[in-house]
Amino acid sequence: VFELQFTHKDKAADIKQKHADKEYKAVIETEDEITEEDLQNISEVVGEIKQDTPERVEHRRADKTRKREVYEASWEKTGDKKFELTVKAEAGTYIKELIHGDEGRTQPNISELIGAPAECVQLDVTWIEK
């Protein structure tokens, strides 16, 4: 962590409410072995996606379908059942659900595109729009 700073309560609230595009790096594990050919399908996630309110947040968010934009997606295979995904997406995109699909509540999703159930085991924000 670099350039970490203390801030006032009011400023923290503003930061949390900011609608900023972000880039993420995710470590993903799959139930089945995946090939480079499977991973090529990830490019189909770039563009508009539709996300119903995820089950994990439906107790605090309105249950509706949200359209979000995925600007970029790249990947690197790191094992037979593991790869790293870098995604740049519109603010408000639920990245974990983009990966596992949330029982079909996110379309398209990485799990369906690669043909194997996938779980995000690590997720880091690597860039925030200023």
Image (cartoon, helix red, strand yellow):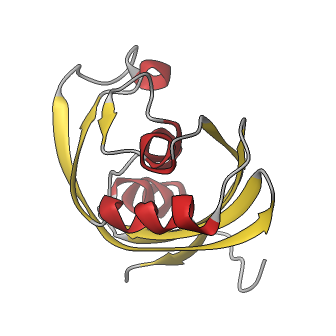
Could you tell me residue 86's position as x and y percent? 55, 71
In this view of the protein, can residue 96 be seen by the observer? yes
How many numbered marks, from 0 up? 0
Along the horizontal axis of the image, is 38 left or right of 54? right
Task: Please tell me whether residue 52 is drawn above or below residue 124 in the rendered image.
Answer: above
Between 51 and 45, the one lying in front of the other is: 45
Quarter of the image for the C terminus: give it.
bottom left
Toward the right, the furthest residue is 79
Look at 35% across and 26% down and name the residue there. Answer: 104
Along the horizontal axis of the image, is 52 left or right of 42? left
Quarter of the image for the N terminus: give it.
bottom right
Could you tell me residue 35's position as x and y percent? 65, 61
Toward the top, the furthest residue is 59
Between 5 and 31, the one lying in front of the other is: 31
Along the horizontal axis of the image, is 126 left or right of 94? right
Task: Please tell me whether residue 115 is drawn above or below residue 68 in the rendered image.
Answer: above
Between 115 and 105, the one lying in front of the other is: 115
Along the horizontal axis of the image, is 58 left or right of 82? left
Could you tell me residue 43's position as x and y percent? 38, 68
Could you tell me residue 96's position as x and y percent? 53, 43
> In the rendered image, which quarter is residue 36 located in?
bottom right
Between 106 and 112, the one lying in front of the other is: 112
Look at 68% across and 66% down and name the residue there. Answer: 84
In this view of the protein, can residue 124 be seen by the observer? no
Task: Please tell me whether residue 128 is drawn above or below residue 35 in the rendered image.
Answer: below
Look at 68% across and 70% down and name the residue there. Answer: 6
